[in-house]
């Protein structure tokens, strides 16, 4: 018998990818959903197994088809990939579990098999980006996940999703093309596509102009994909008009995967080889991160559609993640990675609660939601818990990541004080924009309405509550994400040969 | 029960009570009130059972969880926290009696939510009082802010929500923007945030950084309302009177000065702060607040607003006393927390009783009201005398210790401030007392009224009696608080 354990990295991608065409064939009602959920849960189980392995110090390396690196495609899973895999598969599973009722409503029964198939492809694409150690392979998986996510975003009944997705498609393609140009230039200079191999060989040609140009293309291309301010314009509309379950899934993980690639590339390949790249990286990304925090939060302050409000808040959160990384220190990187995990928890739970709200309310702006807590108290309490985590109130996961980020910033000397001030101001703005929603839902008298609004379905509520409570759990029991984040930061700063 | 389970019980009892109050509220208001009073009684039992051990010098503690390496959710009972918890739990019972009279007398809506949030905020207060380190303190400090918001915005109309937003906005921005960075700073330089006798910061910060850190703490704990972070307190006057009493006497503002005192004594250490000249500004900031707030109070026409500014001044007494940085003054700070609580809760109860009985809120409406409401106005007079610091009331005792501490430090500015503020206090309280008793009643016919409902009158009688009793019998409190600085010359 083949030891299953050794094939885990490949199975992580293969399971959802092979099930995707099968799902298309499942016409009977509900079956496609069940199969997609099962596939997603299997992927989650594999991710958990991989996480356990990396926690015990293992580094998974897998030669695709038996072709050894650097000639063949190598899969490689370390604690950074494991952590993000956990986020991606967890987000997919939990939104599929919670989202059936919502998706049944927005997607016609006849198109559901196609939709769930695209969902699984997006999942396998994202997982693929995380397990592979091959630069070109990353591009392939990036395209798979992007194309599939255009489909799921536009899969609902909201026609406004179409222009939004078109914008996303154009910008996403530009980003991917930039990345590909960069890879091409590096391949031309080094003759390799394997990241580890690349990092060894690039040293000899590090001062050549094509390499510098490649670094520029790759960084900008990935920043576009990751919606780094000011390359974020595709994100708010895509999040706002996508089906609610899709928003919850993508908001929790899609941009983080691009950030993962950005960090991987910059730290593993460029950082140690390009002279002064450390400074360039920090000097380029830190101002953008600060602007993202301030601008994203400011727009969120004045936004009244809550999905769009949360989307702009996501922009700010991407800023925090980048800010940690741009400090180029162990503490900064682990803060950054931890932030990815905890933000996925908070934002995922928030969008799940929004999805539950949407079961009762057709319009999701603050005026329509006045008094919502009276009709949907369970949903709104979950929303409040997740919102507190997003703000970073002690006792929630969000606090832990902000604590780490502030500690890391304080290590940076005088500049650090300025960064702390930015973090604090961003958090205060988060208090205000989250509070606007809470105040509308809890303390404002409801608008005249004729329809009776009832609480969301029980399964949706249970899953939303699990997500919300995990924010508290990981705010108190912080060992798992911290260990993973520390190990991830170490592997970025001092990658193994 | 052993000490650890008593500490836990003090946190859990109000929370469980809140749950039961919520359930009982669906059945019957009388049952709900019974649950509130039982919970309050039970909490008193739990908290006060801890007292004997603290007197004997025990410092029972309890560690719940390690959030980050070196950062725990931990509790430890020491004299200052013990006093705060004992005070808050005791006054909660009296306040609940009063609330029953007030809320029913005014036919307030959403009474169940009111009692539930009241119980939750008491749980948060217990957490603050027993917190063993800065992190735990902050956790419950935020919980108290959030759980009191529904109470402040109870009325729910536009103006109220706007004021409640000021309340929440100032408290939250200060705590997240200033207090939290101060706490993180402390953890990162000292490696710990545990409250330790003698302080933890000596040798870790020096020079101007000490003054800066102290500033972050003092203005971060905006609940203490040191100017300029005092605006939330007058804004919160829109709340129902029992909530004002909770804010001013039982929990909220006390949580602020408690935090500051605790930080000065257990994080900086008074000797360390005394030796750092950059910490000197705090004393002057507090002295300024005392005088300025008293001057503003002089000009108020609304009774509750006047009381609010009086509170701002009285809180800065505590901060100033703590900032004198001498053992006797620290004792005075602790004693003043008690004394002010008794006096101010009486004044608010009286203001609420007047409102319940007659809907009067402005000073000029109060002419001759003493004859219609003799018990209430007697209690009011006692409270006012205590604010001024006239014997035989509680205010005299604490001022005595603060002055003694000022002499220990040869601090004549403190002396002058106290004298000036006493004169100002007299200048705004005595005219009210005069008008109330000696001017002619001009109540228009048809709106005659008597005393407020019995429960309200009973509550304010109790607190007025406490105000006088504290003057006569304050040895236990002194004994407890003198342990606060024992071991520090």
Image: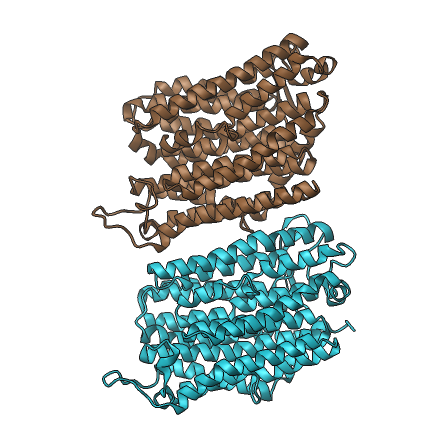
Chain colours: A brown, B cyan
In the image, farthest residue toward the left? A450
As drawn, B471 above or below B50 = below
Residue B269 in the image, given as x and y percentages of width and height: 73, 65
Q: Residue at x 58, y 89 (%)?
A: B391
As drawn, B311 above or below B150 = below
Is B105 placed left or right of B181 in the picture? left
Residue A331 in the image, given as x and y percentages of width and height: 68, 38
Q: How many marks?
A: 0
As drawn, B117 above or below B404 = above
Most foreground residue, A252 or B264: B264
Most foreground residue, B421 or A59: B421
Residue B48 in the image, given as x and y percentages of width and height: 57, 75
In the rendered image, which quarter contains the C terminus of chain B? Answer: bottom right
Decide if residue B7 is in sight here: no
Q: Residue at x 39, y 47 (%)?
A: A437
Decide if residue B471 is in sight here: yes
In the rendered image, which quarter contains the N terminus of chain B? Answer: bottom right
Residue B258 in the image, given as x and y percentages of width and height: 60, 67
Most foreground residue, A372 or A322: A322
Q: Residue at x 70, y 29 (%)?
A: A493
């Amino acid at each position: 018998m083949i030891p299953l354990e050794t094939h885990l990295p490949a199975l992580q991608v293969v399971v959802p990818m092979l099930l995707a065409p099968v799902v298309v064939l499942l016409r009977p009602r509900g079956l496609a959903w069940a199969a997609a959920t099962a596939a997603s849960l299997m992927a989650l189980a594999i991710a958990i197994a991989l996480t356990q392995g990396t926690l015990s110090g293992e580094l998974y390396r897998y030669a695709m088809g038996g072709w050894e690196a650097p000639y063949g495609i190598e899969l490689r899973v370390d604690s950074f990939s494991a952590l993000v895999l956990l986020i991606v598969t967890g987000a997919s599973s939990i939104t599929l579990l919670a989202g059936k009722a919502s998706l049944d409503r927005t997607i016609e029964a006849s198109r559901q098999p196609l939709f769930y198939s695209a969902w699984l492809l997006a999942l396998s694409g994202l997982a693929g980006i995380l397990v592979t150690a091959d630069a070109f392979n990353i591009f392939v998986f990036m395209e798979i996940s992007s194309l599939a996510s255009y489909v799921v975003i536009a899969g609902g009944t909201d026609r406004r999703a179409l222009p939004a997705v078109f914008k996303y498609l154009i910008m996403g393609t530009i980003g991917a093309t930039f990345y590909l140009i960069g890879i091409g230039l590096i391949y031309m200079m080094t003759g390799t596509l394997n990241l580890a191999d690349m990092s060894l060989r690039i040293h000899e040609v590090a001062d050549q102009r094509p390499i510098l140009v490649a670094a520029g293309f790759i960084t900008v291309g990935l920043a576009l994909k990751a919606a780094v301010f000011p390359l974020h314009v595709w994100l708010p509309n895509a999040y706002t008009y996508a089906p609610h379950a899709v928003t919850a899934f993508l908001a929790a993980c899609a941009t983080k995967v691009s950030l993962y690639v950005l960090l991987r590339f910059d730290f593993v390949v460029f950082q140690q080889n390009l002279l002064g790249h450390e400074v360039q990286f920090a000097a380029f990304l830190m101002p953008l991160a600060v602007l993202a925090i301030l601008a994203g939060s400011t727009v969120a302050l004045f936004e009244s559609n809550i999905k769009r409000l949360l989307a702009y808040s996501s922009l700010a959160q991407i800023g925090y993640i980048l800010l940690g990384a741009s400090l180029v220190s162990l503490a900064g990187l682990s803060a950054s990675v931890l932030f990815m995990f905890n933000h996925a928890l908070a934002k995922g739970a928030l969008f799940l609660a929004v999805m539950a709200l949407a079961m009762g309310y057709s319009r999701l702006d603050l005026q329509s939601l006045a008094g919502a807590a009276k009709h949907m108290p369970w949903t709104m309490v979950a929303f409040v818990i997740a919102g507190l985590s997003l703000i970073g109130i002690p006792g929630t996961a969000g606090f832990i990541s902000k604590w780490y980020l502030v500690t890391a910033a304080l290590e940076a000397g005088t500049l650090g004080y300025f960064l702390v001030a930015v973090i604090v101001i961003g958090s205060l703005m988060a208090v205000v924009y989250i509070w606007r929603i809470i105040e509308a839902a809890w303390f404002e008298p409801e608008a005249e309405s004729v329809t009776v609004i009832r609480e969301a379905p029980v399964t949706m509520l249970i899953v939303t509550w699990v997500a919300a409570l995990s924010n508290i759990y990981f705010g108190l029991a912080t060992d798992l994400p911290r260990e993973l984040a520390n190990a991830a930061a170490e592997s970025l700063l001092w990658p193994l040969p | 029960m052993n000490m650890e389970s008593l500490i836990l019980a003090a946190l859990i009892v109000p929370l469980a009570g809140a749950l039961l109050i919520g359930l009982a509220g669906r059945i019957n208001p009388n049952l709900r009130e019974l649950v509130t009073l039982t919970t309050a009684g039970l909490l008193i039992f739990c908290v006060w059972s801890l007292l004997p051990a603290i007197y004997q010098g025990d410092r029972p503690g309890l560690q719940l969880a390690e959030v980050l390496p070196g950062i725990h959710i931990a509790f430890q009972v020491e004299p200052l926290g013990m006093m705060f918890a004992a005070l808050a739990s005791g006054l909660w019972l009296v306040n609940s009696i009063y609330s029953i009279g007030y809320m029913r007398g005014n036919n307030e809506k959403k009474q169940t939510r009111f009692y539930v949030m009241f119980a939750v905020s008491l749980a948060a207060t217990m957490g603050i009082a027993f917190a063993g380190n800065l992190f735990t303190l902050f956790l419950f400090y935020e919980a108290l802010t959030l759980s009191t918001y529904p109470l402040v915005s109870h009325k729910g109309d536009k103006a109220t929500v706007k004021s409640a937003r000021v309340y929440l906005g100032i408290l939250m921005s200060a705590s997240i923007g200033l207090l939290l960075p101060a706490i993180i700073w402390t953890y990162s330089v000292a490696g710990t945030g545990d409250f330790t006798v003698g302080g933890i910061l000596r040798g870790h910060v020096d020079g101007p950084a000490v003054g800066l850190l102290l500033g972050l703490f003092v203005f971060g704990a905006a609940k203490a309302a040191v100017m300029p972070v005092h605006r939330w307190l007058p804004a919160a006057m829109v709340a129902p009177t029992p909530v004002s009493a909770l804010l001013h006497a039982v929990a909220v503002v006390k949580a602020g000065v408690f935090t500051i005192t605790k930080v000065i004594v257990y994080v900086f250490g008074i000797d360390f702060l005394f030796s750092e000249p950059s910490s000197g500004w705090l004393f002057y900031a507090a002295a300024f607040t005392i005088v300025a707030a008293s001057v503003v109070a002089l000009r108020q026409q609304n009774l509750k607003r006047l009381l609010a500014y009086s509170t701002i001044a009285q809180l800065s007494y505590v901060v100033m006393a703590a900032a004198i940085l001498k053992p006797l003054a620290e004792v005075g700070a602790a004693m003043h927390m008690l004394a002010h609580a008794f006096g101010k809760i009486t004044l608010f109860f009286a203001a609420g009783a007047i409102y319940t009985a007659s809907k009067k809120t402005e000073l000029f409406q109060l002419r001759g009201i003493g004859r219609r409401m003799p018990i209430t106005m007697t209690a009011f007079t006692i409270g006012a005398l205590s604010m001024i610091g006239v014997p035989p009331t509680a205010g005299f005792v604490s001022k005595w210790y603060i002055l003694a501490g000022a002499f220990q430090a040869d601090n004549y500015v403190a002396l002058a401030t106290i004298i000036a503020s006493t004169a100002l206090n007299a200048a705004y309280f005595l005219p009210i007392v005069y008008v109330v008793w000696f001017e002619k009643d001009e109540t228009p016919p048809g709106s005659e009224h008597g005393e407020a409902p019995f429960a309200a009158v009973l509550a304010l009688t109790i607190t007025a009696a406490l105000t006088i009793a504290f003057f006569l019998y304050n040895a236990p409190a002194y004994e407890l608080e003198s342990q606060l600085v024992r071991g520090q010359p």
